[in-house]
Amino acid sequence: MTPSHIESISNNPDFQQLVRRKRRLNGTLTAAMLVIYYGFVLLVAFSPSTLGQSLSGGVTTVGMLVGVLIVLVSFGLTGIYVYRANNVLDPLNDKVKQECAQ
């Protein structure tokens, strides 16, 4: 691939839109997961008794519920990424590849 070919791809408006959308999606999902994870870590550090409280008097604690919810949210965020990648990013990527192949 020649430098002029790389430059023509970089200057393509669809390629620039693809890069922007991918960065925004990755940044948003990463920030969401970091806030959730570090929020949990801060809760463990500063209020461990909250996580140790029993749910309805049984052996299941609030911390166990929160841990399961964090795992489920991470699966959900992964699902959002896959959906957006398949329905927004991949078609745009295919369009850029077709335009640049000509």
Image (spheres, helix red, strand yellow):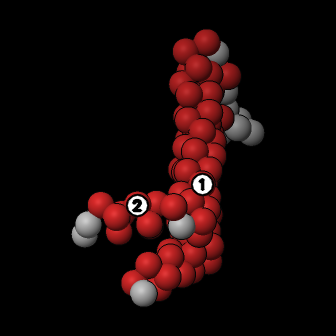
In this view, the residue in front, 12 or 17, is 12
**Residue at the spot of label 1:** 20
Q: Residue furthest right?
A: 56
20 sits left or right of 98 in the view? right
User: Where residue 47 appears, x then y in whole percent?
Assistant: 64, 15
User: Where residue 3 appears, x then y in whole percent?
Assistant: 30, 61
Q: Judging from the image, what secondary structure is the residue with disc 1 in?
A: helix
Answer above or below: position of 36 versus 8.
above
37 sits left or right of 56 in the view? left
Q: Which amino acid does label 2 sit on?
A: Glu
**Residue beneath the point at 57% across and 45% down:** 27
In this view, the residue in front, 15 or 72, is 15
What is the quadrant of the N terminus in the image? bottom left
- Callout in the foreground (2, 1): 2
User: Where residue 74 appears, x then y in whole percent?
Assistant: 55, 52
Number of labels in the image equals: 2
Question: From where the camera sits, is residue 53 visible?
Answer: yes
Point out which mark residue 7 bears: 2
User: Where residue 48 appears, x then y in whole percent?
Assistant: 59, 18
Answer above or below: position of 38 versus 92.
above
Answer above or below: position of 64 versus 83.
above
Question: From where the camera sits, is residue 48 visible?
Answer: no
Residue 40, picture quadrant: top right
Q: Judging from the image, what secondary structure is the residue with disc 2 in?
A: helix
Answer above or below: position of 62 versus 84.
above
Find out whether the residues at labels 2 and 1 contact each other: C-beta distance under 8 Å: no
Alpha-carbon span between mark 2 and mark 1: 17 Å
Q: Residue furthest front?
A: 4
**Residue beneath the point at 59% across and 20% down:** 42
Q: What residue type is labelled 1?
A: Arg
Q: Quick one: label 2, few (<14), some, or many (20+) residues within 10 Å?
A: few
